[in-house]
Amino acid sequence: MVSVNLSLCFFSTMRSRGIEAVRILNDFIADAVVGTRSVDLFDRLTKDRSLSEGTKVGMARMCYFHLILLLAKWVEFYEKYNSVIPADCVKECRALTKEIRKRQVPGFRNKYVGHVWNKDTNQPLSSKEISRYMEAVTKGDGAAFLLWVNDSKGNRYPNSVVSIISHVRDRLRVQYKIDREPFEET
């Protein structure tokens, strides 16, 4: 009797964590889609209107930094929620986390996205430093980076960030019997 109660308690706790994870992953999917689609939208805007180069660069930075924050959040999510990730998704989740780290995303987020000062050199951040990190994050190809995050014409699992996140979210719904969208209480 005690082991049955402990099992139910464990499932209940894991289910609660699964519900939290689904809510977070829903936000990640929205952030990835909006971030990548905004680049397309801004590209069309710049072709139709006369915008300064500074405005074009600023719009692109906003979108890329938004996506970098999302990818850094994925690393944190994986660290905190890997215990609820379904077994058949672990390999792809681990590979995604490894790729994000390889691209130096957490370092870029911690050092550049929210700062103007390089603590190591005790000087303002230079455009060259930021460009070097952006090269690492995008592997030198902004268009390929955007497709890696969200290939809106074919998010095939596990070829894009969105496909992995969506698949994990859907598997969590099945594993923890989540039949409606989890939203935080307001």
Image (spheres, rainbow, N blue to C red):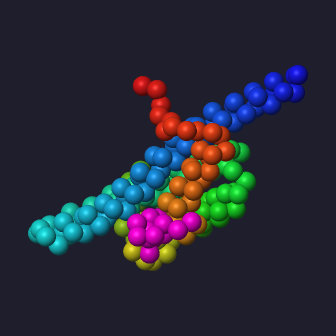
Residue 111 appears in view:
no
What residue is drawn where x is 67% and y is 45%?
A: 175
Q: Outermost residue, left direction?
A: 50
Residue drawn at x 54%, y 55% as measured from the top left: 165
Magenta stretch containing residue 151, yes or no?
Answer: yes
Question: Is 145 left or right of 78, judged from the image as shown?
Answer: left
Residue sitting nearer the eye, 51 or 92: 92
Spot occupied by residue 20 in the image (x, y as percentages of width and height): 57, 37
User: Which picture quadrant has residue 44?
Assistant: bottom left
Magenta stretch: give its range.
Answer: 144-157
Q: Is residue 156 a member of the stretch shown in magenta?
A: yes
Which residue is rendered at x = 63% and y = 39% of the image?
177
In the depicted view, which residue is nearer to us: 115 or 157? 157
Residue 48, image x and y in percent? 13, 70
Q: Is residue 177 above or below residue 1?
A: below
Provide residue 153's location: percent of width, then percent of height.
Answer: 41, 70
Q: Is residue 29 visible?
A: yes
Q: Residue at x 49, y 38 (%)?
A: 181
Residue 8 drawn above or below residue 130: above
x%, y% of residue 58? 27, 61
Q: Count all numbered tags in the image, as a single digit.
A: 0
Quadrant in which the N terminus is drawn: top right
Q: Relative to 89, does residue 176 appear above or below in the rendering?
A: above
> Outermost residue, bottom direction?
140
Q: Quadrant of the C terminus?
A: top left
